[in-house]
Amino acid sequence: MGSSLDETTRRAVVDYLGVSPGERFVIVADNRTSTSLSKALAAHALAAGAEPVVTTMAARARSGEEPPPPVAAAMLEADVVLAAASRSCYHTEAKGAAVAAGARGVFNAPSRESAWIAGAMTADFRDIREVAERLADRLRGGSEMRVTSPAGTDVTFSIEGREPKGWLTGICRNPGEVSAFPGGEVSLPPVEGTANGRVVIERVMTDLGSLEGPIVWVVRDGHVVQIEGAADARRLRDHVEGVENATNIGELGIGLNPQARITSDITESKKRIGTAHMAMGDSAGGYGGSVVSDVHLDGILMTPRIELDGRVLADDGRVLV
């Protein structure tokens, strides 16, 4: 399924973010962002009577690394933010400050035009939102979760007291509402210190891109205590070396987007319906956890089985809500 850049950017600005006359709309790009994307978003904001501002920074070394002060200042003054940089701005203090000041918006979106005209961005996020709300309702009030997969994942953890996140599916029309593009997940952080078992990451991971083979996380008391595998495992070990709290198990996300493709781009891949993703690192940046880290690294689990208090929520590529 394909679409035009004009169509998907119009839906993002008008239908999903509800940009209104007079609003300050900040578009965060970096030197890897397609200029055509920034221009199209700004054009639709102008047509809606808003005040678009495009900020362009050097690409950050890691997702979650803070933007430079001028970009952070623009976000702080915004009514609406759409961050389409090549590294995610979601787990940053700048995002938290902007939201606390009343901004709404999307703090992680595809940076390349190609991702806006095919795949997950062409789905109707309003339809996905209905499924996401049902899944979020199932998660609320739950306690013990178990995730397994054919590749060898078998991990358990508590979600007691945790509120589902990400179920807005990119539709942020009220002050303080935060999401990511493409829409298509429900997520939450495990209770700190409760995760135990093995997580086998397949196909793609944040900041690493496509994987040549699986990466195994050995998890004990909420932390990755060992990273096993070949070259990609070494790359991950090097990437997190010396980064405070990088080994924390920070998230479980459940994909819901039927148009999402599994590519080298984690932003789209993790939204694929029937997949899940788990993350190392930060759980405090809008996720409801308490662990702060400079990284938040998602890795894909293909066709997982997800059980909550013995009830199956997802299995064999299907979400059962």
Image: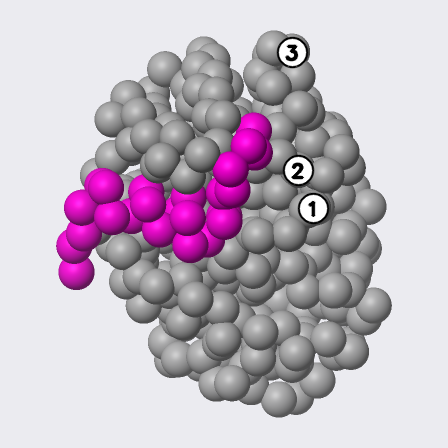
Query: Within the magenta stretch, is there residue 17?
Result: yes
Nearer to us of marks 3 and 1 is 1
Residue beneath the point at 46% across and 53% down:
16
Q: Is disc 2 surrounded by few (<14), some (14 to 19) or many (20+) residues within 10 Å?
A: many
Please report contact status of discs 2 and 1: CB closer than 8 Å, yes or no: yes
Q: Secondary structure at mark 2?
A: loop
Q: Quadrant of the N terminus?
A: bottom left
- Could you tell me the amino acid type at mark 2? Ala
Give the percent coordinates (x, y) of residue 287.
70, 50
Q: Earlier in the sequence, mark 2 or mark 3?
A: 3
Q: Secondary structure at mark 1?
A: loop
Q: Which residue corresponds to mark 3?
A: 69
Q: Is disc 3 surrounded by few (<14), some (14 to 19) or many (20+) residues within 10 Å?
A: few
Q: Earlier in the sequence, mark 3 or mark 1?
A: 3
Query: Within the magenta stretch, is there residue 176?
Result: no
Q: Which residue corresponds to mark 1?
A: 176
Q: Which residues are magenta?
A: 1-24
Quadrant position of residue 120: bottom left
Q: How many marks?
A: 3
